[in-house]
Amino acid sequence: MLPVAMLLGIVLHNYIGYVAFLSKYLIFVMLLITYCRLKWSDFHIGPYIGWLLGVQIIGAAALYFILRPLDPVVAQGIFICVFCPTATAAPVITGMLGGSVAKVATYSLFSHLSVAILTPPLLSLMTESADISFAGSLLAISRSVLPLILGPLALTALLARFATRAHDAISGHQGLSFYIWALALIIVVGNSVSFLMKEPANMIPQMLLLGAGALAVCVTQFAIGRRIGHRFGDAVSGAQSLGQKNTVLAIWLTLTYLNPLASTAPAAYVAWHNIVNSYQIFRKERASHKAHNTSNSVSA
């Protein structure tokens, strides 16, 4: 589904503009489906959440301020790759790899809440110009981002309280979020390609730098997340919580509020974190296959 969605986004980029407005609504629905899956009994709140959030927030800010004097656009692209929250599909991949789905789902909620609260002031500081004040930028971003991320959580609570049948129906159809994600991916990739195609050839080195930077922070986040997770007894959950990102949201935020060229980084991250996950799943399945063969040999 990943290569098909990306290919469609590339091929249809000239027409994506007609449906680009759907991106935020698709993100809203994906988060609603994910939140409906959560139950209070599933929450595993522990110190690992603080460590992971520290890397996500403090790490993103530190990289931005380090890279900004060198290249503001690259700084924005790398920032969003670290700052954006955990992917809505991360619990699914975690389950396939043998990690704790509950831990990743819990962290996903905290990471999205953190992004909802911190995105308006942080992005307002990055985009502040003579044309719009910090307060004006803060208000504009808050109006768009807060309902997008906090709205699904509020609606989930209302459904659980007053419309349990609807809540249970949504909770029982988690597979829908995968197909909605694929549709959203077509749109955001098409938007990115449409913008990048208009850039002059002299921007290619900067785009390559953004793609390479995305690869570096992707591998680093998986590694750091694994070490934090290992410290608290679940390396897989830590790696997926920090390394697998909600790139659809990241690209949308970048195209909407930052330099659109910076969207090259989260667009590249789409490929990088899915390549890492594909490799991890391949290793897991190969190990399981070997263990099965060994067991059969012993039994024989």
Image: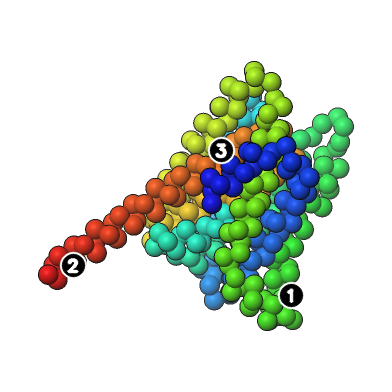
Q: Within the image, what quadrant is residue 95 found in?
A: bottom left
Considering only vertical position in the picture, is 113 above or below 193?
below
Q: CA distance from mark 3 to mark 1?
A: 37 Å
CA gap, disc 3 and disc 2: 42 Å
Q: Nearer the viewer, residue 147 or 203?
A: 203
Given the current orientation, which residue lies at the most extreme top position? 202
- Pointer 3 local density, CA inside 10 Å: few below 14, some 14–19, many at least 20: many
Circle 1 SS class: helix
Give amino acid for label 3: Ala
Residue under the image location 64 percent in, 47 percent down: 186
> What is the basis of the colouring in this image?
rainbow
SS for callout 2: helix
Kind of residue sitting beneath label 1: Leu
Q: Residues within 10 Å of mark 2 (few under 14, many from 20)?
A: few
* Tag in front: 2 or 1: 2
Specify whether 107 is left or right of 194: left
Whether 111 is drawn above or below 171: the answer is: above
Spot occupied by residue 287 in the image (x, y as percentages of width and height): 28, 56
Which residue position holds label 2? 296
The tag earlier along the polypeptide, 2 or 1, is 1
Residue 201 picture location, percent across and down: 65, 19
User: Residue 158 shows which numbered tag?
Assistant: 1
Q: Could you say which disc has been placed on residue 268 in the image? A: 3
At 69% from the left edge and 71% from the top edge, which residue is drawn? 156
Type of amino acid at the residue the image marks with label 2: Asn
